[in-house]
Amino acid sequence: MNPEDFRYHKEHTWVKVSGKKGTIGITDYAQDSLGDIVYIDLPEVDETVESNSEISEIESTKATSSVISPVSGKILKVNEELAESPEVINEDPYGKGWIAVIQLDNPSEVDDLMDASEYEKYVEEEEK
């Protein structure tokens, strides 16, 4: 189940907004599709990213996949624990498996993202 207070991008990333900051990660659907995650290339702190652009790469036993930022802004913090234990993303994609915290350049971008029910419908369509 996808958390109701998150917003979702069509590239299977999520953002949880708190004030002018957003925490970013990949969805449960994405981690399940990837399989066992063995490595993540974390973004750089202080890097400026655009929405719809790659912020990192995840390698799994099946494939390497880009992580696309759902919002624009400056990276404030990255989840260093993932460098040692990338499998945390498989275990807890909406909690301990977060990837980065970003200072939102344009908080209204969040309005363009899907809510939980829209995202679930999107995934169902994609699986057909």
Image: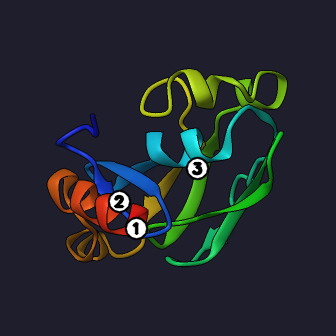
Q: CA distance from mark 2 to mark 3?
A: 30 Å
The percent position of residue 51, horizontal first and vertical second, equals 49, 76
Q: Nearer the viewer, residue 62 or 102?
A: 62
Can residue 94 be seen here? The reply is yes
Q: Position of residue 102 (x, y in %)?
A: 50, 55
- In percent of the image, x 25 and y 37: which residue is there? 3
Q: Are marks 1 and 2 in contact (CB under 8 Å)?
A: yes
Residue type, numbered disc 1? Glu
Q: Secondary structure beneath disc 1?
A: helix
Tag 3 residue: 76
User: Where residue 56 appears, x then y in whole percent?
Assistant: 73, 58
Q: Relative to residue 4, is residue 64 drawn left or right? A: right
Residue type, label 2: Val
What residue sits 21% from the left and 51% below the top? 116
| Quarter where residue 60 is shown | top right
**Circle on res. 123:** 2
Please name the residue that numbered disc 1 is placed on. Answer: 126
Q: Are marks 2 and 3 in contact (CB under 8 Å)?
A: no
Relative vertical location of residue 46 with respect to residue 86 in this rendering, above or below: below
Foreground disc of the pair 3, 1? 1
